[in-house]
Image (cartoon, grey):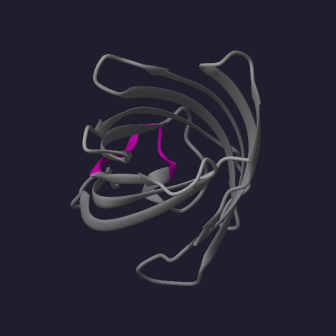
Amino acid sequence: MLIRPGIGYALTDHSTVFLGYAHVTNYPPVGELIMENRIWQQYQWSGPTPLGAFTTRSRLEERWQDNGSDTGLRFRELLKFNWPFWFHPAASFVVANEVFVNLNNADWNAPTAKQGLDQNRGFVGIGYRWTPIILTEFGYMNQYINTAPGTRDRMNNILSLNMYLDF
């Protein structure tokens, strides 16, 4: 489970900075639930292209988990493209990729706390703008998770539904 509120400030029509907090409940394969708290900062640029809208987002997260005392630093980079359908501009084809990189080692007892590539998420789907403030995206997400040395990396196939509220 993930709760991630944030607040943003538009620097220009295309450029926004955000600050936020996330509370995450992790469900490990064995053992107790692990609670994680994050503070995050991000810069986002969105702009038009001849085919549709392009977005890039850079996010830095400071992470704390119940099963350790270190602060984990993680950088995330998202590239996303929305291609509106000519016959119905409120709907669009969406393709995105996000790379997660741990910038340090943390003392959590988890493979995702090690420095280097943490995970990659690729998404393909359909977006629909219901109102000026409500957008949903439905589609397929492939999530690759880099695990501990000597264990098999995980590959998750996810049916994804996201809702975005732009206030």
Q: Position of residue 62 (x, y in %)?
A: 69, 42
Give the residue drawn at x 32%, y 50%.
146
Q: Is residue 156 above or below residue 83?
A: below
Q: Position of residue 123 (x, y in %)?
A: 30, 49
Q: Indicate the quadrant containing the N terminus: top left, top right, bottom left or bottom right.
A: bottom right
- Look at the image and give the residue range highlighted in magenta: 113-124
Most foreground residue, 121 or 161: 161
Tell me: 51 left or right of 12: left
Q: Is residue 58 above or below residue 62?
A: above
Q: Which quadrant would residue 48 be assigned to in this image?
A: top left
Q: Which quadrant would residue 14 be assigned to in this image?
A: top right
Most foreground residue, 112 or 81: 81
Give the residue drawn at x 64%, y 50%.
133
Q: Position of residue 108 (x, y in %)?
A: 59, 58
Give the residue drawn at x 65%, y 66%.
67
Is residue 120 one of those drawn in magenta? yes
Q: Main secondary structure of the magenta part?
A: strand
Tell me: 81 left or right of 11: left
Tell me: 138 left or right of 30: left
Is residue 3 one of those drawn in magenta? no
Outermost residue toward the front?
87
Total residue callouts? 0
Q: Position of residue 8 (x, y in %)?
A: 75, 35
Most foreground residue, 39 or 68: 39
